[in-house]
Amino acid sequence: MQNKSSLKILSALANENRLQIMQWIADPLPHFPPQSDGDLVDDGVCVGSIATKIGLSQPTVTKHMSILADAGLVTHKKLKNWVFYKPDQQAIEQSLADISELFK
């Protein structure tokens, strides 16, 4: 169990906007319209789409996504001029197991 890693994850998710974004991108089809570039499920959700949905500027959303990526909760992919994010399911599952160990 790595306390520092767990703290980084909990800190990233402690922000209301980041938690909402994680919920939306975990199941993107009902939350985002189709994208001209990139598949919502396979490639992830474009930062611009996330910014529009949450009502924040693109630079602010980019900062939030960087924090989530630094915590290991999302992966990103660049297609053309756009950056797409999706949850890193394997890392999330491992993080949940690590956090669960804190309480044993």
Image (cartoon, helix red, strand yellow):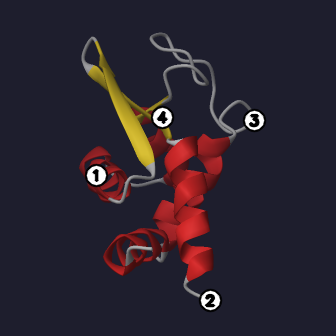
Mark seen at residue 30? 3
Alpha carbon separation for disc pair 4 and 3: 13 Å
Going 58% across and 79% down the picture, which residue do you hit? 101
Q: Nearer the viewer, mark 2 or mark 3?
A: 2
Which badge, 1 or 4, is on the more N-terminal residue? Answer: 4
Q: Nearer the viewer, mark 1 or mark 3?
A: 1
Q: Nearer the viewer, mark 2 or mark 1?
A: 2
To which residue does mark 2 refer? 103
Callout 1 crowding tier (Cα within 10 Å): few <14, some 14–19, many ≥20: some
Which badge, 1 or 3, is on the more N-terminal residue? Answer: 3
Using residue 80 as the reference point, say whether residue 104 is left or right of it: right
Going 62% across and 76% down the picture, which residue do you hit? 100
Alpha carbon separation for disc pair 1 and 4: 16 Å
- Tags 2 and 3 touching, CB below 8 Å: no
Q: Nearer the viewer, mark 1 or mark 4?
A: 1
Alpha carbon separation for disc pair 2 and 1: 28 Å
Going 62% across and 89% down the picture, which residue do you hit? 103
Q: Quadrant of residue 4?
A: bottom left
- Tags 2 and 1 touching, CB below 8 Å: no
To which residue does mark 1 refer? 66
- Tags 2 and 4 touching, CB below 8 Å: no
Using residue 69 as the reference point, say whether residue 32 is left or right of it: right
Callout 4 crowding tier (Cα within 10 Å): few <14, some 14–19, many ≥20: some
Mark 3 falls on what kind of element?
loop
Above-or-below relation of 90 to 64: above
Q: Picture coordinates of residue 80 (x, y %)?
A: 27, 11
Q: Picture coordinates of residue 30 (x, y %)?
A: 75, 35
Quarter occupied by the N terminus: bottom left
